[in-house]
Image (cartoon, helix red, strand yellow):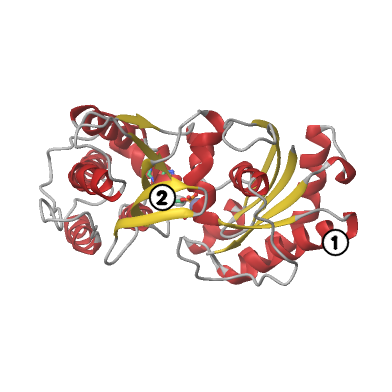
Amino acid sequence: MLVLGIETSCDETAAAVVEADPTPGTPVGRIRANAIYAQLSEHRPFGGVVPEIAARAHLERIDGMVARALADAGVGFADLDGVAATAGPGLIGGVIVGVMTAKAIALAHDKPFLAVNHLEGHALTTRLVEPVAFPFLLLLVSGGHCQLLAVQGVGRYRRLGTTIDDAVGEAFDKTAKLLGLGFPGGPAVERAARDGDPAKFDLPRPLWRKPGCDFSFSGLKTAVRLAAAGLPKDDPRAIADLAASFQRTVGDILVDRCRHAFDMFRTTCGLPPDTPVPLVVAGGVAANQHLRARLADVAASCGARLVAPPPALCTDNAAMIAWAGIERLRLGLVDGLDVAPRPRWPL
Ligand code: KG4
Ligand code: ZN
């Protein structure tokens, strides 16, 4: 089974071809092509993603990316078994470009169309590379989301906790901006933090040890802003210390919330208290090596194991959309060409 995936919901214009066995329940696919154009130079002058510019860049690039993905995979439209595109949530101009491109290909070549929820793309990515069975506990940490979910099957998600204010990736991006580390923020903070002292600044951990597993990052963002304002000008040491302290604090928060989530997850899925469950981490922030190490520790201490996709598949890409398309197509979950792109679409 061969599926073309298209991703255009933020600032990556991406197309990929993924191949898999057509039988449901046999996870793990093969990425035949994974073409990504990251719109960094378009957005860098503004210090963040500008929706209008993103939509225009997607429109200019998408045909070329699809052609490249097919060429890299050595296949043509006729070889495809389906065409999948992110249909939301995301910046609507970009989502429209991806959905219309996929629908046009599906219509012209008489192929099934698959409208993929971007979050489902992140949620299922790990099964593209490792045979992780359902149910699993998912920590989804990206630029727009921070959630803990019980993933019981394709299309079967129970939300255990979510952020009550900002997403964790947003906190990384804001911290990078405040520290003058540039765009994109997450990798820049991680790089700066390598040389810093994580114990230098005592930053707040909102909802720390409170029941449940919701998140909050706005108080941390404010504390970073105040601390940044008090730093000596252009002192790389002080910047590294604040970056490291911020990253460690995010790690503390994620670890505390996951600890609570394991119990909620087992109860939700009706599993005995000591069942070893996989903790899957996904989304752009999951590329962070410090956080992956912290999450591996908490998983081990809770009788679980951490499963994380390779960093390149954590940040937005089209292979994850093609793979989610395959998981849906194998179950016959095909969409009509009247499906509308959605700016908001909770899992
Ligand atoms: O999943 P993603 O590529 O796009 C969304 O769906 O939002 O996530 C992007 C987010 C950005 O906020 C970015 O700063 C963050 O993921 N990110 C990181 C790292 N790489 C990307 N955050 C921390 N450490 C990283 N290495
Ligand atoms: Zn994403």
Label 1 sits on residue = 107
Between the C-alphas of marks 1 and 2, the distance is 39 Å
Is residue 254 shown to the viewer in this render? no
Residue type at numbered disc 2: Gly
**Percent x, y of residue 259:** 19, 42
297 and 108: which is toward the camera: 108
Label placed on residue 185: 2
- Quadrant of residue 299 within the rendered picture: top left
Is residue 32 shown to the viewer in this render? yes
> Residue sitting at 10 percent across and 47 percent down?
202
Q: How crowded is mark 2: few (under 14 residues within 10 Å), some or many (20 or more)?
A: many
**Percent x, y of residue 6:** 68, 52
Callout 1–callout 2 Cβ contact below 8 Å: no
Number of numbered discs visible in the structure rendering: 2
> Residue sitting at 26 percent across and 44 percent down?
243
Q: Is residue 314 left or right of residue 325?
A: left
Q: What element carries label 2?
A: helix
Residue type at numbered disc 1: Leu
Q: Is residue 53 left or right of residue 206?
A: right
Query: Is ligand 1 less than 8 Å from the beta carbon at label 2?
Result: yes
> Residue sitting at 14 percent across and 57 percent down?
207
**Percent x, y of residue 126:** 49, 36
Q: In this view, does 326 lie above or below 117?
A: above
